[in-house]
C-alpha cells in the first residue's frame, strides 16, 4: 500500500512542475521499523518510540483534541493518548 500511495504522490508531484519535489521517506521508515504491524510488535502500540507513520498522540491543526482524547476521534482508541 505504501508503494502504491508513493507512486501516486510521485506522479502528482512530477506533474506539478519543477518547483515541487517528492521526498520518498520509505527507506528511513524501513530502517527504524516505524510502520504499524511490524514483526514482534503487539498492536495497537501508538506510543511506540519508533512509530513514524502517524502517532495517535498527534493532533493536527484543525482537529478537535478533546474529541480525540474522549475516544470519539475516528478510530483513536480511548486511553491510548
Image: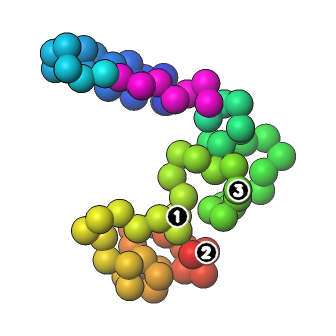
Relative to 10, 71 lies left or right: right
**Which mark lies nearer to you, 3 or 1?**
3
Task: Check if mark 2's residue and mark 3's residue have beta carbons within 8 Å.
Answer: no
Whether residues under marks 3 and 1 lie with C-beta atoms below 8 angstroms apart, the answer is: no
* Sequence-wise first label, 2 or 3: 3
Q: Is residue 61 magenta?
A: no
Distance CA(mark 2)–CA(mark 1) = 8 Å
Residue beneath label 2, please?
A: 80
Q: Is residue 3 above or below residue 68?
A: above
Alpha carbon of mark 3 to alpha carbon of mark 1: how far? 12 Å
Of 18 and 6, the residue lying toward us = 18
Q: Earlier in the sequence, mark 2 or mark 1?
A: 1
Judge from the rendering whether residue 79 lies leftward or rightward of residue 49; answer left or right.
Answer: left
Of tags 2 and 3, which is closer to the observer? 3
Residue 24 falls inside the magenta stretch: yes
* Colour scheme of the picture: rainbow
- Residue 67 x %, y %: 37, 82
Residue 46 in which image quadrant:
bottom right
What secondary structure is found at the residue carrying circle 3? loop
Q: Residue at x 45, y 86 (%)?
A: 70
The C terminus - image quarter? bottom right
Along the polypeptide, which appears first: circle 3 or circle 1? 3
Q: Which span is picked out in magenta?
A: 22-28
Q: Which residue is mark 1?
A: 56
Mark 1 crowdedness (10 Å alpha carbons): few <14, some 14-19, many ≥20: some
Query: Circle 1 — which element?
Result: loop
Q: Residue at x 35, y 23 (%)?
A: 22
Measure the alpha-carbon separation of dots 2 and 3.
14 Å
Circle 3 sits on which residue?
49
Q: Residue 13, can we see it?
A: yes
Amino acid at each position: 500500500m505504501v508503494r502504491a500511495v508513493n507512486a501516486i504522490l510521485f506522479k502528482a508531484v512530477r506533474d506539478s512542475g519543477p518547483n515541487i519535489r517528492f521526498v520518498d521517506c520509505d527507506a528511513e521508515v524501513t530502517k527504524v521499523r516505524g510502520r504499524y504491524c511490524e514483526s514482534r510488535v503487539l498492536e495497537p502500540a501508538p506510543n511506540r518510540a519508533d512509530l513514524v507513520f502517524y502517532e495517535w498522540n498527534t493532533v493536527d491543526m484543525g482537529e478537535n483534541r478533546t474529541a480525540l482524547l474522549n475516544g470519539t476521534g475516528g478510530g483513536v482508541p480511548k486511553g491510548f493518548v
